[in-house]
Image (spheres, coloured by chain):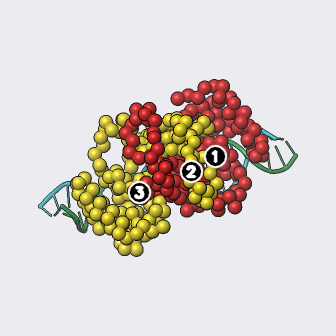
Chain colours: A red, B yellow, C cyan, D green
Amino acid sequence: MRINKDNTAKRLLEFENVCRNAGVKVTHQRREIFREVAATDEHPDVESVYKRVKVRIPEISLDTVYRTLWMLHDLGLVVALGVSQERVRFDANTSKHHHFVCTQCGMTRDFYSDDLDNLKIPDQVRSIGRIDATQVEVRGMCLKCIQKKQPPTCASRKKEST
Amino acid sequence: MRINKDNTAKRLLEFENVCRNAGVKVTHQRREIFREVAATDEHPDVESVYKRVKVRIPEISLDTVYRTLWMLHDLGLVVALGVSQERVRFDANTSKHHHFVCTQCGMTRDFYSDDLDNLKIPDQVRSIGRIDATQVEVRGMCLKCIQKKQPPTCASRKKEST
DNA sequence: TTAGGTGCAAATTCTTTGCACCCTG
DNA sequence: CAGGGTGCAAAGAATTTGCACCTAA
């Protein structure tokens, strides 16, 4: 689904404000990259964004897309999907549980709640596929990362986890 | 947190049953790999599982751990964390929304629900960190994958997405 | 016995980095 | 004009694969 143009325009303004407030330069590349991500709800991967932006900016390089997306992530303008921004992790905890995920370091902690175990999922969802499990994912920043108070960088991902 | 031994033992029996039913051999390596994943709730990555299993089976190879974990995943004995089992994806949809994720192909679709937008998160969670957002993640199998009815393989991940 | 499983090493794929030049503020 | 941003090419990681030998059923 394409997001309507008005909304995309609004989000572009927001993007520029956030950048300026953060002391980050608003470049042609960054604007176009943000525009592409904001214009779709398909959760594109880096390669897809790269291809789409390339239509408007043929000289753009893949690593600029990586750097920019992580920068947008640090500024809170986009969310990185996947519990951790790191390697695949496996969970054999079969008892019902939910996740708290730190958006900074990827740390994931289980928590429990009877209420959240029994959520009503809207019927429309069944038209997407068969539902096997339902889980609440809370995104935020863990105490450790709050302390570090990492200043927003334009860099790419650092390595660290828990 | 370590999971208590009784429960782990029970899960090992379950593991053996599921394997036999699926016509998959129960090998020493597989048993030890499953034991390690079932014994913790730390959502270990492949490397961690590898290191732990290596204590009991020094000759084990990393790729066996990869293959086995994905096989356990195909059998439904463990869950792969991260919305997609693939590359990082980005989401700039700032309106409240929730995700349906196909555990087979990684396809992720947004859905909306006012009820789910306003969940009460237990207080205990605030002791983990600051909560920025809350989202429901529904795991299941998309219509396309149900049709394909992929027979359980012991192979690793194939490439496909949406 | 025998098909499926394993270890090894090599190949892929995805992502990040170093550096010289460029452009926004 | 200055310092951050970009493109390029090369490095690094994470994950997968081909193959010959091994082992659970």
**Residue extending furthest toward the front:** A115
Task: Name the residue carrying label 1.
Answer: A73
**What element does badge 2 sit on?**
loop
- Residue B71 seen in the current view: yes
Q: Tell me the amino acid under the disc marked 2.
A: Ile
Q: Position of residue B48 (x, y in %)?
A: 46, 65
Q: Position of residue A47 (x, y in %)?
A: 54, 40
**What element does badge 1 sit on?**
helix
**Residue extending furthest toward the top:** A5
* Crowd class of label 3 (few under 14; some 14 to 19; many from 20; radius 10 Å): few
- Residue B87 seen in the current view: no
Q: Residue at x 70, y 56 (%)?
A: A150
Callout 3 and callout 2 share a chain: no
As drawn, the label of residue B29 is none
Q: Residue at x 32, y 52 (%)?
A: B75
Q: Residue at x 57, y 42 (%)?
A: B118
